[in-house]
Image (cartoon, rainbow, N blue to C red):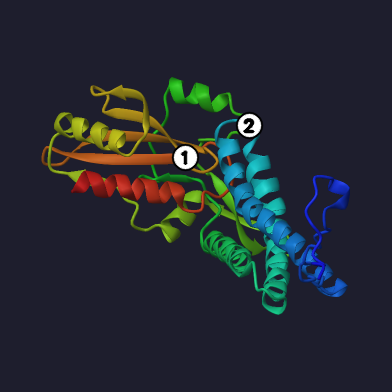
Amino acid sequence: MTDPTPEPTDNPDHNPVVTETPEPKVFDLDTSEKKRMIARRWVLRITLGLTILSPLVFILAGFGAKFGLWSWQFGLGTLTREVGPVLLIATLVAGLIALAFALLIKPRKGIVIAVFAIIIPIAGFANLKATQAKVASLPLIHDITTDTQDPPVFGATIMAERNAVKGVNTIDYAGKRAPTRQRDANGEPVTKLVSALQTQAYPEIRTLVLSEAPDVVFGRVEQVARDMGWAIKDSDSAAGSIEATATTFWYGFEDDISIRLRPAQGDGTRVDVRSVSRVGLSDIGANAARVKKFLDALAD
């Protein structure tokens, strides 16, 4: 009986054909589902970009002005007050859309990005709202002094620096007035004396009287000024005067400070301080807070 199994041969043309087992067929996603996933991917990318960009604009606005990359008007006015809020709104809208896509399309992806995109604008608008409320509650002044009848003056060094600033605020105090939010019959802002506005808003800003003599107090005064990070521009122990400049962390606004020491009754010392912004109408309470912090530190 003949064996039907063919014998192996060295001729490849006569080798048996080996058939490969086909792999299981992978069915493609539905076309509409593919489109939804692609749309979600792009929404998440845009949302992530806006989530990074929106706070970055506010940061760049402040530091760009501080380091001279652009003017404080561009940083505070254009970037912070105009561009920034638009980006926050865009981020919030993108975040809401991204959250809907993340929850409705399976597998669920991008929820964390969407949540951050919603939280950041809400926090940003809350901060802007708080700042606006603070501005509305304070007078539109930028010149604070413990002695409104005879405020400390500034010497040649600081005056030269101030005069080099375009649109610098005046340091003339007698009769100095500032606009209020009240309107007259013609719709124009009612103005009041800066001294009156300060006394109403910051009644705690007063001359500090210490028991030590001026020559004893002078060293403490200068040290406290340095501890507060002020740049000392002039120091005269004989005249009892110290002049300095404070630079704000955001936008790099420069405010000038004049400290004056005079003898008081009983061998004591009267310490008067004046802090004036170089630019801007309202200081949002910065000068008053600076003067109070200085007096509190000196009194301890």
Image quadrant where residue 220 sits: top left
Depth check: 18 or 260 in front?
18
Depth check: 256 or 73 in front?
73
Left or right: 227 in relation to 24:
left
Viewer can see residue 186: no
- Give the x, y percent position of residue 194: 50, 50
The residue carrying mark 1 is 276
Image quadrant where residue 21 sits: bottom right
The residue located at (47%, 41%) in the rendering is 248
Left or right: 282 in relation to 154:
right
The residue located at (80%, 45%) in the rendering is 10
User: Is residue 121 positioned above or below 68 on the image?
Assistant: below
- Give the x, y percent position of residue 172: 51, 36
- Give the x, y percent position of residue 245: 42, 32
Image depth: mark 1 or mark 2 in front: 2
Depth check: 2 or 128 in front?
2
Mark 1 or 2 closer to N-term? Answer: 2
Depth check: 97 or 196 in front?
97
Viewer can see residue 58: yes
- Give the x, y percent position of residue 25: 80, 71
User: Is residue 155 positioned above or below 180 on the image?
Assistant: above
- Say which mark, if any, is on residue 153: none
Q: Secondary structure at mark 2?
A: loop
Direction bottom: furthest residue: 104
Direction front: furthest residue: 1
Q: Secondary structure at mark 1?
A: strand
Density class for disc 1 (Cα within 10 Å; few <14, some 14-19, many ≥20) is many
The residue carrying mark 2 is 69
Q: CA distance from mark 1 to mark 2?
A: 24 Å
The residue located at (32%, 49%) in the rendering is 293
Amino acid type shown at disc 1: Val
- Labels 1 & 2 near each other (Cβ < 8 A): no
